Image (cartoon, helix red, strand yellow):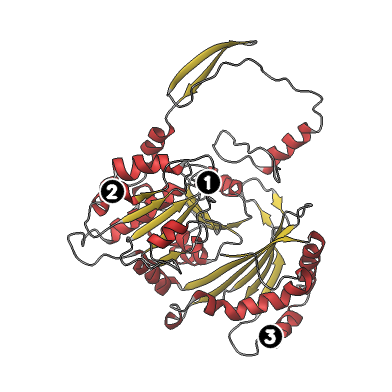
């Protein structure tokens, strides 16, 4: 059965339609009395490029099948320094692995990484698109990209003696990405911050400087710190790529990203998985331009740890509680909003949970609301935030309150500036704040759940 059904409508800028348009479309659907179906259309072979023409009731009709990879490649070549990436990929001590999870990105990957950039064909995994994604789930994360995770030396059950230097995965339609180093996972929040911090030096398209950067509200504040350091315009927007598109159309944003493995720039009005991979390869090529002859390579892990040493580290995790009773989920959110009326009370509760100095005080709490600086539209009730004195955050969001039950998403972020503490295990560093989040929200009391469905 269909749990979700609808259409995605893209505008002439190539990006998702803004709310003003989708609301109008919905309004129009309420007045539809009948619709027409065209029958007897001839079959068009969409596996071959070319134009097919036929006559319809309204006259001649053309279907133009074109090779989108050629157009895409041309665009990417105008953004990145392909020869320098090629040099990196031809270095004997640099191996990469790209897993398309049997989605459409596999077609682009062969043409771009193997034919254009000279990567070995064995670098590509699951790059033949399949309607059922080979029986897997095409979500580029540590849970579902099992083969890539094992190959990169991150599997708990399988040990890999010599993982590649760089790994990446795509989702089914190729717009999201996961980036890995040798035995090292890069969080999406860190990834967009690191791309922004290195873009001007490493990517020709940005050599004139960045117009601004943006992230979705639940994404960690790693990008905020980069923006502050580099004196860049910065925007925090609700979840949904259309909010980034407005900023990009107005010339206010160059690079943006969200914690759900979406990263992109103003070259198109959508997130772009292969763009993110090429951005990382460009940074690696730039950092290694003087030591491809056999010296020790600057690795993905080196780049991330250097970033943390410069900007501080945002320890980050997301807890998803799926199919929670919708009534209970709403009660939990109402409880969290009520708590916000007295920060003294909130801080008293926190001190009762953690009397030591592991968790700092809440200095601001609200329901996130966004006023679009471009068109002035206001988006309310976008999530409940608790912001701490040391830059840490708790965010609670509710989605899908239909008959199937709701999903509560809890985002936990601990900011650490002390360079002696940036190498800790993520779960260990976050443990005190996780405990505060669960007890403050009365998660188990309201939902009956002692653990989340998924931890990212």
Residue 256 against residue 309 in the figure, above or below: above
Residue 268 against residue 441 in the figure, above or below: above
Count of numbered marks: 3
Please name the residue that numbered disc 1 is placed on.
248
Task: Mark 3 vs mark 1: give the one in front.
Answer: 3
Give whichever of 57, 223 is nearer the camera: 57
* Circle 3 SS class: helix
Does residue 197 appear anywhere in the picture? Answer: no
Q: CA distance from mark 3 to mark 2?
A: 53 Å
Give whichever of 27, 160 is nearer the camera: 160
Q: Position of residue 282 (x, y in %)?
A: 33, 53
Q: Quadrant of the C terminus?
A: bottom right
What residue is at 33 percent from the left and 51 percent from the top?
Answer: 123
Q: Position of residue 92 (x, y in %)?
A: 21, 57
Q: CA distance from mark 2 to mark 1?
A: 36 Å
Q: Position of residue 224 (x, y in %)?
A: 52, 64
Please name the residue that numbered disc 3 is placed on.
353
Q: Which mark is first along the chain, 2 or 3?
A: 2
Q: Which mark is first along the chain, 1 or 2?
A: 2
Please name the residue that numbered disc 2 is placed on.
120
Does residue 318 appear anywhere in the picture? Answer: yes
């Amino acid at each position: 059965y269909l749990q979700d059904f609808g259409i995605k409508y893209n505008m002439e800028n190539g990006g998702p339609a803004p709310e003003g348009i989708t609301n109008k479309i919905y309004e129009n659907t309420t007045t539809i009395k009948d619709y027409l179906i065209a029958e007897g259309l001839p079959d068009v072979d969409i596996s071959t490029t070319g134009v097919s023409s036929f006559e319809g009731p309204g006259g001649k009709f053309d279907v133009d099948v074109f090779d989108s990879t050629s157009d895409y490649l041309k665009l990417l070549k105008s953004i990145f320094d392909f020869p320098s990436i090629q040099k990196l990929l031809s270095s004997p001590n640099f191996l990469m692995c790209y897993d398309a999870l049997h989605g459409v990105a596999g077609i682009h990957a062969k043409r771009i990484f193997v034919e254009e950039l000279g990567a070995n064909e064995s670098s590509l995994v699951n790059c033949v698109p399949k309607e059922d994604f080979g029986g897997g789930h095409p979500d580029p994360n540590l849970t579902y990209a099992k083969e890539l995770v094992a190959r990169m030396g991150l599997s708990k059950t399988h040990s890999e003696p010599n993982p590649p230097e760089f790994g990446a995965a795509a989702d089914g339609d190729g717009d999201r990405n996961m980036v890995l180093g040798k035995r090292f996972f890069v969080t999406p929040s860190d990834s967009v911050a690191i791309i922004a911090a290195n873009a001007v030096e490493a990517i020709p398209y940005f050599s004139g400087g960045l117009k601004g950067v943006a992230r979705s509200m639940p994404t960690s504040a790693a990008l905020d710190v980069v923006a502050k350091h580099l004196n860049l315009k910065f925007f925090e927007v609700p979840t949904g790529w259309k909010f980034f598109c407005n900023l990009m159309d107005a010339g206010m944003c160059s690079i943006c990203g969200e914690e759900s493995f979406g990263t992109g720039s103003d070259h198109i009005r959508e997130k772009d998985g292969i763009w993110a991979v090429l951005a990382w390869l460009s940074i690696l090529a730039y950092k290694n331009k003087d030591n491809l002859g056999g010296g020790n390579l600057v690795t993905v892990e080196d780049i991330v740890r250097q970033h943390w040493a410069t900007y501080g580290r945002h320890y980050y995790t997301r807890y998803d509680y799926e199919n929670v009773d919708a009534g209970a989920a709403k009660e939990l959110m109402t409880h969290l909003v009520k708590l916000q009326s007295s920060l003294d009370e909130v801080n008293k509760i926190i001190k009762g949970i953690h009397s030591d100095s592991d968790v700092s005080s809440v200095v601001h709490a609200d329901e996130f609301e966004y006023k679009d600086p471009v068109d002035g539209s206001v988006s309310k009730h976008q999530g409940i935030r608790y912001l701490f004195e040391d830059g840490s955050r708790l965010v609670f969001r509710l989605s899908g309150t239909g008959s199937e039950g709701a999903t509560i998403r809890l985002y936990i972020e601990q900011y650490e500036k002390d360079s002696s503490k940036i190498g800790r295990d993520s779960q260990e560093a976050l443990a005190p704040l996780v405990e505060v989040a669960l007890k403050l929200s009365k998660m188990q009391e309201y939902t009956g759940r002692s653990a989340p469905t998924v931890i990212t």
